[in-house]
Image: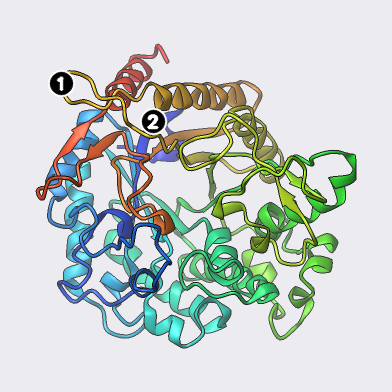
Amino acid sequence: MGHPLTSGRLALGTASAAFQIEGASDRDGRGESIWDVFCRRPGAIRDGGDGVRACESYDRLDDDVALVAGLGAQWYRFSIAWPRVVPEGTGRVEARGLDYYDRLVDALLAAGVQPTATLYHWDLPQPLEDAGGWLSRDTAVAFAEYGALVHARLGDRVRLWASHNEPWCAAYLGYAAGVHAPGRREGGRAHVAAHHLNLGHGLLRQALPDAVGLGIVHNLAPVWAEGEESRDVADRVDAIRNRVWLDPLVDGAYDDVLLDVAPVLADPAVVRDGDLELIRGSADWLGVNYYTPVRPAASAAGGAARPAHTEGEAYPGAGELDLVVREPRTDIGWEIDASGLEELLVETHRRTGLPLVVTENGAACADDAIDADGVVDDQDRIAYLRDHLAATRRAVEAGADVRGYLVWTLMDNFEWAEGYTKTFGLVRVDRGHDELPRVPKASYRWFAEEIARSTDGQG
């Protein structure tokens, strides 16, 4: 296989994350993560679920790789569980953890699938959180050390790496809104976590100066003001959602609006000399996770319900705001608007000049239509994916350098604070049966056909 960034055609595939599918959380030397602890907090998870069992992918590696291969996926994006590899976050390395990812990578390559690895998808080792978590600069240092040792083991076969997945969620949902692990509500201190996540990526690049294919994945969002009177608050929301990540990466700076919102980022004890220059230019590519636009209003506009991922508390310093969610919506309550993805890709390419990958895009659907063969007939998900894949292709036609489109997600799994109540998968995991059988949905068949057409040059 050539390098995945030089394929010359929009690659299609799917994605997953370790904590959401692996299970085996207390086996083979794996340490405890912040999500293991958070799941035990009463009321933290909608259905009281956890990742102890998840989808048992740790034990069913071959079955799940076969699902990826059966889809015809050209790329498969997965994450590596930091506590499975370095149980305490620093120090002792667990060989059995690295062995598991070795087997996964080899199985994917044998199936003709490009493995794409994410080093941090939110499962911080609990000992690091006990020492301050992402509010501590030491966590950024520990992350770079962990990432470098994983790259040393797998970098000969994995050609596309992401340092972080959605650091906005890790910083602002984890340390401001408190709706994600570690469940802290530190207000503006969450901006410190954001900087340390940026720094961790920069330090990883410093540790791997010659690595080709190191990027970072952000859940960027188009920010659309609800009315003229909301433009200022929308600008502040955009600073926290998008510019806190892109400006250091491109310009090596935090802009004036962000510094007004987050004055702690002007503190030289937090943002030290050399930090921003280390981050600048540190990505070879940029992953974009897109589900929904963000519509800030200076005051309640329409009284629309707000899902957890857009609570006002997740934008500390932006001021009094409401976040409007229009119809139609997915089953998790997120507005559906494929034009937002097209706009986001065109604008992000203009802003960064980097190759882009749609690293996640998908829909939570009720999945309550079952055909005579027991297959989920998820036409609503198919419509969502068809529209968003078309939006991606329009962005390419408009000049955006997009190299891949990956559906979230391969199979139904642990959906963070929603537990197992929301399903995004192309494959149903039937939790009503102890064996957790995997049953491909209609969307799986549709996407397999789409991939086949694309491979044949018809897509």
Residue 9 visible to the viewer: no
Residue 268 - label: none
The mark closer to the camera, 2 or 1, is 1
Residue 453 horizontal side relative to residue 133, left or right: left
Answer above or below: position of 261 versus 456: below
**C-alpha span from label 2 to label 1:** 27 Å
| Image quadrant where one finds the N terminus | top left
* Picture residue at 17% right of the left edge, 26% below the top: 374
- Label 2 neighbour load within 10 Å: few <14, some 14-19, many 20+: many
Viewer-closest of 201 and 359: 359
Residue 154 x, y percent position in the rendering = 28, 59
Residue 190 horizontal side relative to residue 210, left or right: right
Question: Circle 2 sits on which residue?
Answer: 12
Residue 26 visible to the viewer: yes
Residue 253 x, y percent position in the rendering = 75, 64
Answer above or below: position of 326 versus 309: above
Question: Circle 1 sits on which residue?
Answer: 373
Residue 294 x, y percent position in the rendering = 67, 44
Viewer-closest of 396 and 366: 366
Residue 286 horizontal side relative to residue 125, left or right: right
Q: Quadrant of residue 50?
A: bottom left
Looking at this view, name the residue that lies furthest to the front.
303
Answer above or below: position of 64 versus 33: above
- Label 1 neighbour load within 10 Å: few <14, some 14-19, many 20+: few
| Image quadrant where one finds the C terminus | top left
Going by the numbered disc 2, the residue's amino acid type is Leu
Viewer-closest of 425 and 262: 425
